[in-house]
Amino acid sequence: MLPLQRMKVLDLTRFLSGPFCTMILGDMGADVIKIERFPAGDETRAQGPMVNGESYCFAMVNRNKRSVGLDVTQPRGRELLLDLAATADVVVENFRPGVTQRLGIDYDTVRARKADTIYCSITGFGQDGPYRNRPGFDIIAQGLVGFLRMTGTPGDGPAKFGLAINDVVAGGTAVQAILAAYIHRLTGGEGQYIDLSLVDSGLALTVWEAAAYFGSGEIPQPSGTRHRRNAPYQAYRTSDGYVTIGGNTEPMWQLLCSDVLHAPALLDDPRYATKDQRLAHLDELEADIERITTTRTTKEWVARLDEARLPGGPVLTYDETLADEHVIARGMVRQMEHPTMGTIRTLAPPAKFSATPLQLRLPAPAVGEHTAAVLAELGLAPPDVEDLLTSGTVYDAALAEDAPGEVGS
């Protein structure tokens, strides 16, 4: 039993934000049917690195899904998509505003077939506002919400967040919204339309930054690893790397100086007597702490922090993270069998359910791998499916070598 195994999702998304959303729903047990243009499929299929001709990036965010190759620009293809939508609880798409209307697969059209449909649109800027028609990728959203101006080291130019933060947070926010709408419908409510954007989702993360600006007019600036409101709270150099230390309350600061750094003189220094004074003398504080932390290894400092029960840890490279004993113990790195790529490593769902543990059931599909099976579930007989294949309306990886067609965008 999986939490969402009674949910059916029609996935019209590509790239990252939408597929990340539907991957999470699939991990939770939803039957996710991914509609793809053919023969190329989702644009992410061309994103390296490639293993045996398959994209590792695509494989990472498209597990637990079934793929249907379908040309919705053809009238028959459009009708098939609407028939599939009528069997689904949720439709998710991330086309630019207006594209689904042009294709005749928009919310109003789908709702006319199934009134309680939950239809989620993920775009760069949302369905209204002066920027609605702009194409929106993650870095565009990072620039608009201020991330590029508050990330990095003071004195340097704009710096990109280390991952596609707006894409993944929009996908995660879409999951929250879809589940809320699903619960509303299950408890007697109606279906509804969800308008969600990368910009809105990213901006909603800036709660501390908004508090500083609304409360004092302070505009967030790059601060490296430092905290804008607490000290000490950053990464410090060690003899062989870096260690993070969170000593931001007065008891923590006192314990850090006495039991970890063995530097009681810091407690007597008037520059560091209060948090505000430590923030006012942050350069001096960093230098004084690093004069001590550079005398020992990261491992030694982490051991001292652990013994004192103070927050701290190593600053790892990504390969070190994936090999870390705690990450391994938490089961965050898993293996899956892929029919073309072989045994691949992937990241596990982060939530650990006691009664309904999540499963990696299906590897990322080939383009149209499940077309015939899904159409059979829709009630089409084999001759009808063969006719659709011959006409180029659908594509099934197992039943046809090639067929022209585009989903459209």
Image (tube, rainbow, N blue to C red):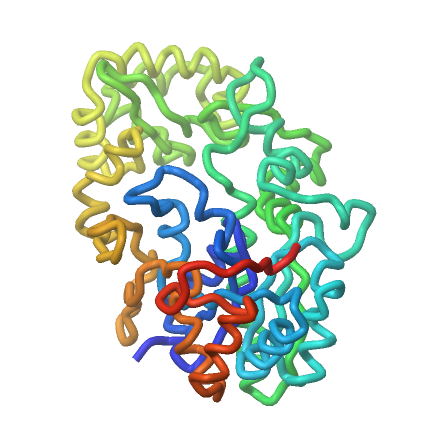
**Vertical position of residue 362 compared to residue 84: above or below:** above
State the residue at coordinates (55%, 78%).
Answer: 84
In the rendered image, the vertical position of residue 66 relative to residue 191, given as above or below = above
Q: In this orientation, which residue lies closer to the viewer: 267 or 382? A: 382
Residue 288: x percent and y percent?
36, 12
Q: Is residue 301 above or below residue 114?
A: above
Horizontal side, residue 233 vs residue 299: left or right: right
Front residue of this view, candidates 101 and 324: 101
On the question of residue 178 being in view, the answer is: no
Q: Judge whether residue 357 can be spotted in this image.
A: yes
Q: Quadrant of residue 366?
A: bottom left
Q: Nearer the viewer, residue 382 or 371?
A: 382
* Residue 359 placement (x, y as % from top left): 28, 67
Q: Is residue 254 left or right of residue 270?
A: left
Question: Which residue shows up at 21% across the image and 53% down it?
Answer: 335
Q: Quadrant of the C terminus?
A: bottom right
- 288 in relation to 207, above or below: above
Residue at x 26%, y 17% (from the top left corner): 238
Image x and y of residue 42, in percent: 50, 53
Total tally of numbered discs in the picture? 0
Q: Position of residue 372 (x, y in %)?
A: 42, 76
